[in-house]
Image (spheres, coloured by chain):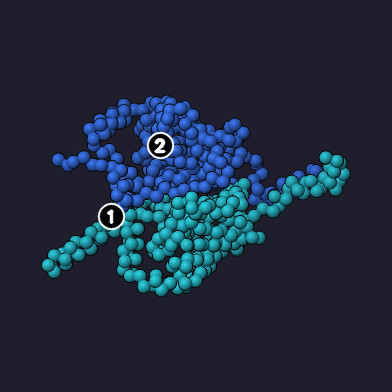
Amino acid sequence: MNHLNNRNGLWAALLVLTVPVLAETPNLSGFWELRFDSRNVPPAPLTAAMAAEDRGVQFKLDTTATRWCHFFGVPYVMEGSTIDILQNVNGREIAITSALRNPARHIYTDGRGHVNPDTFDPVSNGHSVGHWEGDTLVVDTTNYRPGLFMQITTEKLHVVEKYTRTGPDSIQWEVTIDDPGAWTKPWTAMIPLRRSKDALYEYACHEGNYGLQGILAGARAEEKTATQKTSSTK
Amino acid sequence: MIKIARVWLAVCATAGILFGQSPAKVPDLSGFWERRDDTGSGSFGGTLEKIPRAAIKPEIVKANQEAAARQARGEVVSFGSKWCATNSYPFFMQHSAAWDIIQGQDEIALVPEVHTFARHIYLDGRQHPDATHLEPSVNGHAVGHWEGDTLVVDSVGFAGGGGTPGGGRVTPNSHLVERFHLFEGGRRLSVTFTWDDPTVYLKPHTYELTYYKSEPGTYAFEEYCHADDPAQGGSVVEPPQK
């Protein structure tokens, strides 16, 4: 501890102890939402196999997912409602919660790598790890459950997001989506998020929900029509 | 030498304020927390058996007895699991699955694995909305503040429909005060719940649950409840209709 007995040594020690304060990362915490100018995203090129899929079947699968309140995962959860980005003060984790019926996202920023896919059950949010590149938070996500994005993604889905504060009330969210099972090449969207003054409500998706009743009534009417058509052709 | 240290501390305090550091040091509650069977009861349901019974109003006692009798006759008293209804607070705090605390400066989120929403606790000094603007929700509207090393959380605005350990009920009239406090060097967390509801309790119902900090590197799973999954639908079996 002799070095503390001279002035330079004390300055050095104080510097080491306080660097974490001065090197603080930008604060992304808050409620954020997409605005009218946030949806200018070009269509992504589907693989030949995926393009050949029957869109009607895809639509039906998606309607089923909506009807039964399935989780849609990232990035749908990021764009369907106000989101809350909450940055842990100890720097080890960031959570993103949405008003949609979807689990919260956990983004681990404690230096860990991805989990072993052989021992991890794929989930709708995938497994996310993040790190800072300057003022930008870079989030890498793998281990997704297949069948997201209108039922087209596979277990190969890999998403890289970059969050950059561009002002006190704005974040630039850049997302690059890669899945050789669904698209011919990775595609990137650059989407501005604006600070929201709205509250975060809970999205009740279950039987008894009036909207869902309407969806179910419509589906039953379709089924009835289909049954009548089948009967009339016999 | 002391003068240098004082100057540096002043610089750090200023930098901390500019960069958003909280000037007041509060305990770090963040991380995954899990319940364990400290009582040796052999089941997580059993771990709640030592919770004191709530002093509840006679009409609630009667309603509980009637529901128990219907259940004993084979009737279905709740279709919640069949339809994947969102579990009401405080269900996930009693569950065997771990839950995660994300601690920001102005907000703390409790993020469960079980099938429900994250709980948002606002620490920015806001109050509860007035009754006409209070949207009922499964987790209620929660505001918190620090009393020394204890996080005190006040919640109202529950949608209701759930229960509490000790035989209580959660209704839109429920008022909950919780106290979060670390002990054993931060390896354990105590949460004391006090429920008050003039439509349910004869006096406030208070009990404590304790949690263990999960291992570093713990990550969250998702509980995926599908109402169209035959196994899920089979979680409730209706008796033959007469």
Residue bearing the label numbered 2: B174
Q: Quadrant of the N terminus of chain B?
A: top right
SS for callout 1 = helix
Q: Between marks 1 and 2, how big is the CA–CA gap?
A: 29 Å
> Eyeballing the image, is A100 above or below B196?
below
The residue that appears at 56% across and 41% down in the rendered structure is B215
Looking at this view, is B79 or A183 the one in front? A183
Residue bearing the label numbered 1: A213
Q: Mark 1 belongs to which amino acid?
A: Gln
The residue that appears at 51% across and 69% down in the rendered structure is A186
Looking at this view, is A61 or A50 the one in front? A50
Q: Which chain is cyan?
A: A
Q: Examine the image and state in which quarter residue A53 appears.
A: bottom left
Crowding near pointer 2: few (<14 within 10 Å), some, many (20+)?
A: many
Query: Which mark is on residue A20?
Result: none
Relative placement, left or right, of B29 versus A183 is right
The residue that appears at 48% across and 50% down in the rendered structure is A119
The residue that appears at 65% across and 41% down in the rendered structure is B24
> Eyeballing the image, is A68 above or below B161?
below
SS for callout 2 = loop
Residue B6: percent from the left, percent from the top? 79, 43
Residue B159 visible within the image: yes
Using the image, name the chain to which the residue with label 2 belongs.
B
Using the image, name the chain to which the residue with label 1 belongs.
A
Q: How many marks?
A: 2
Q: Which chain is blue?
A: B
Residue A200 visible within the image: no
Looking at this view, is B118 or B173 the one in front? B118
Residue B30: percent from the left, percent from the top? 57, 43
